[in-house]
Amino acid sequence: MNSWPSDKPSPVWMSLSRETFEAPKLEGEAHAYAVIVGGGISGLTTALALARRGRKVIVLEARRVGYGASGRANGQ
């Protein structure tokens, strides 16, 4: 079985951005108000909105932020 997505995203915004982000792998036990699965536009917007309201949020992303459909849509 092939893993999705089969083509690597190459959005212009990702290659031109000066922003970088690295986070450690989640290991062991963690507690949060909400766990967001997927670091795309919807997941990050939800996480940001909750964090701004003082909630502890964990975002789980299998590859890297913006990698999947959000990366293929130029992040718009």
Image: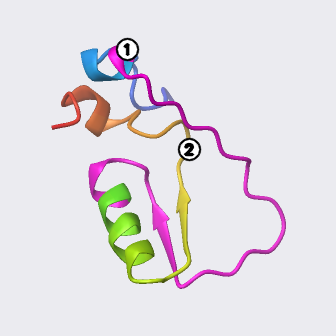
Q: Which element type, helix, strand or loop, lies under badge 1?
A: helix
Q: In the figure, 13 relative to 38: above or below?
A: above
**Residue type of the residue flagged with mark 2:** Ala
Residue neighbourhood size for the residue with mark 2, other residues' Cα within 10 Å, grouped as few (<14), some (14–19), many (≥20): few
Q: Which residue is mark 2?
A: 62
Q: Which mark lies nearer to you, 2 or 1?
A: 1
Instruction: Tell whether label 1 touches label 2 (CB within 8 Å).
Output: no
Q: In the figure, 50 relative to 43: above or below?
A: below
- Give the residues drawn in magenta, as a range: 15-43
Q: Identify which residue is drawn at 73% across, 47% down.
A: 24
Residue 59 in picture, x, y percent from top left: 52, 60
Q: Quadrant of the C terminus?
A: top left
Q: Which residue is mark 1?
A: 15
- Residue 9 visible (yes or no): no
Tell me: 28 left or right of 14.
right
Residue 67 in picture, x, y percent from top left: 41, 33
**Residue type of the residue flagged with mark 1:** Ser
Q: Identify which residue is drawn at 27% across, 57% down.
A: 42
Magenta segment includes 41: yes
Tell me: 24 left or right of 40.
right
Furthest-left residue in this view: 76
Q: Which element type, helix, strand or loop, lies under badge 2?
A: loop
What distance separates the C-alpha of mark 2 from that of mark 1? 20 Å
Displayed quadrant of residue 23: top right
Residue 30 in picture, x, y percent from top left: 73, 75
